[in-house]
Amino acid sequence: MEIKWAMAIDLDRCTGCGACVVACVAENNIPVVGEAEVEKGRLMQWIRVARYWEGEYPEAQAVYLPVPCMQCKRAPCETVCPVYATYHNEDGLNAMVYNRCVGTRYCANNCPYSVRVFNWFDHVWEKPLDEQLSPDLTTRSRGVMEKCTFCIQRIRRAKETAAEEGREIRDGEAVPACVQTCPPGALLFGNVADPHSEIARKLKDPRRFRLMEHLGTEPRVVYLKRQKGAGR
Amino acid sequence: MNGSDHLSRTDPGALYRELSRSNLPATKKWWLGVGLLAIVALWGIGCFVYMMKTGMGVTGLNRPVMWGSFIATFVFWIGLSHSGTLISAILRLTNATWRAPILRGAEAMTAFTLMVGGLFPLVHIGRNWRFYYMLPYPNSRQLWPNLRSPLMWDAVAINTYLLGSLTFLYFGMIPDLAIARDHATGWRKKFYTVLALGFRGSHNEWRRYHVASTIFAILIIPVAVSVHSIVGWDFAMAKVPGWHSTIFAPYFVTGAIFSGIAGVVIVMATLRKVFHLERVLTVVQFENLGKLLCTMSLLWGYFYFSEFLTVWYNRNPEEWEVFRSYGGVYLPLFLTMIGCNFVVSFPLLCMRRVRRSIPALSFVSLLIVIGMYAERFLIVVPSLARRNDPFIWHNYFPTWVEFSILAGALAMFLLLYAIFAKLFPIMAISDIQEHLFHTTDRKIGDVTVESIAMPHDTGKGGHG
Amino acid sequence: MNGIVVVGLFDAVELAASAASALRALPLPEGDITTISPMALPDGAVCRDPRGIGFPRVTLVGWFVGALAGLALALSTYLLYPLITGGKAIISVPPTLIVTYEVAMLGALAGTVLAGFREMGLCRFRTRLIHDPRVQEGKILLCARVSGDEEAKRAMDAMKTAGGIDVRPEEGEL
């Protein structure tokens, strides 16, 4: 079966709690850089919950927009890399080869969503924090670009399990950490090529839109618009 | 020498001695200057190593401003490099009679600015020690460069331009190296003998030499234009509001020539002062360069206005936010750019008095170089600092590490230039001789060589 | 073809020109007479170079060789590393054109240098070349390749008559 991964983010459900960010940090060995570095704009998190304000005080309302890597079909980051460190993998995901990266940071410039983060320093996990590092993926050295992978290690594991058992991968088997964690269930992940999958149904929602669609990047992350009105 | 204001026409030995003053044995002052430059350059290198060991975090860069002073400086140096080779090629092809004293200095400037500027992409990248991943050579790592990346176009173009400029510089120097060889003694004799490649000035050599230098001039012009176009395309190819613009390639080329000429004026004024070349580098050269600067300033103003106007009228919010920031945090830089490049310098350059005064023209050129640096910075940084998503907007200011590396690069350029001037003929002696020779009608054998107007003999004429 | 070359220094171009006409009247073939001068003299002023200038053709050849190399680099990249990036076609024409162009220009420059040096007769460090540093004092060295003592004597006479200084036979190449 062909696989086309996609993520749906229901803005109606997002409460801006940030659990997805924490889950992502824990899953993907993302360094915590500390307050001073964050102030310099060097947050390493792969997903950010952007917060905008709607209306004027006291009627102001927060709007939360979780922004992971959009895994664009026509990814602008890929073409500009001089060393093919970022490319399209067989699942149509936008993959990153850390070992290849020389750190020109052109990809980050060319990403309209600015979801790529750069290792400004070598990061250390002090004991005993290093014990919590996930063995499924590496830590990245200084000078390397990184970004959300849709938890590719989980996707790989699910695929391998399915292959071992001689079957197709089931809906809901591969779930990125952020999706798994989201308390209000605002995030959904799955294979849109499978017409029976939950995500395929969800993406038929008329509220759907994609971020900066006019740029023609064809993101694989689809947002469901927030409805206005009573109880919202 | 003979107390007159003019170069020696009849005594080539005296002419050589006058023009090769820079090659005299090094004085204490020279060593002091070179030593200071070497210290600054070493400090810059030290800071670079520190940055490499610690990480790019020691710079002021952040998300979204992933490119900063290094890239701005890269563009700036590559822009300066357009002075030499391009100008000297155009002057050669148009047979501008006043060109001779400028050629060598300008061509050397191109070579060294390219060498220094070409370092910056390497300084800038996160894993400098892995720079060879970008070279196309078969290897076991399954690595190959991606030619679709504008950075690779850049690499290819700068490679061609650097090799071309070095050849152009060297080729143009061969007759002068031969002259130096015939005059020199000691180790310099051996040095020039090897470098002159056995050029003697036979009829056969001269004829082919002229054809070859014409071909070089013809070839190097499109290369120079393509190089800065590609530097412009590094930005224009990106999906970044404020960068993604069709005007970038010609705009960059114009800016490059503009800053390049300003650079040439400064270098020429310095050479003139330091090596007492007042009788070669006369007001004529400076006035003509001043006129070119005036034209380029106008052209730059025109390009900038065109770019600004389209964004201003359209008010595409993404692009407009970039321009709006010019009125905010980047206002000082914006005013510096507009003032130095156009508002102040253009009226000044329109004045004959300014163009004919070497200190005044040097001052205006310095303004232009500063203004063009500000322009490069404004192209690179605000567009990134005001990316599509306002949530991540962030400003950028370089740190001491970056300033040190930039200063080190400048010192490195000056150092290269000082060493070059000490070792090589910094004035195109044979071209100057030829020019002097041609300034009188004479019948040579069966051919009459017509004289070319000789403005710097009268010291009054304004045209070359 | 090491031979005897009669050389003579002349103070002025005019003198050298008249000496050269005398040499041609001897007669010596035009290709065997040349000058060494501190600056270029127009063709025909003193001597004429009968050989054509061929190396610009190499410039053209260099351009095409460079273009082929650039094209090969681009195409082999697409063939050997068919990685899909940005969902775009593997072979993209504009980058190919750019790379081809730049390498072609490099080829043309290299061709000009190599062929130009060769045709100018540079880089002959091992052969003894006729030269007199006194040309840098504004003098002109007239050289005539002769065969046999008889011709050498006549050439020397012609140069001396025309006002040549230090006219002498030398062994070496032009």
Image (spheres, grey):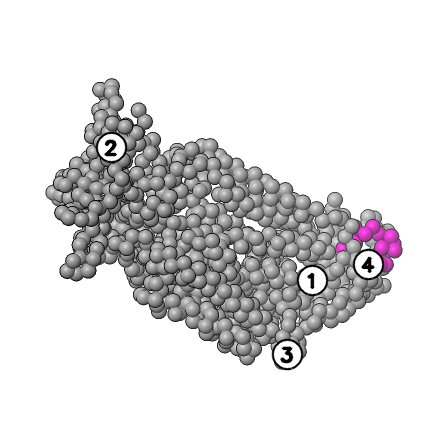
Q: What residue type is labelled 1?
A: Met
Residue identifier under label 3:
B460
- Note whether residue B198 is visible: no
Left or right of C116 in this view: C147: right
Mark 4 residue crowding within 10 angstroms, few (<14) / some (14–19) / many (20+) = many
Q: Position of residue C137 (x, y in %)?
A: 69, 67
Q: What residue type is labelled 3?
A: Lys
Q: Where is residue A177 in the image (x, y as percent from the top left)?
A: 19, 37
What is the chain identity of the residue bearing mark 3?
Answer: B
Q: In this view, does A55 lie above or below B17?
A: above
Q: Which one is closest to the eye, mark 1 or mark 3?
A: 3
Residue identifier under label 4:
C20
Q: Which one is closest to the eye, mark 4 or mark 1?
A: 1
Residue identifier under label 2:
A201
Residue that sits furthest to the top in the current view? A166
The local secondary structure at tag 4 comes to: helix
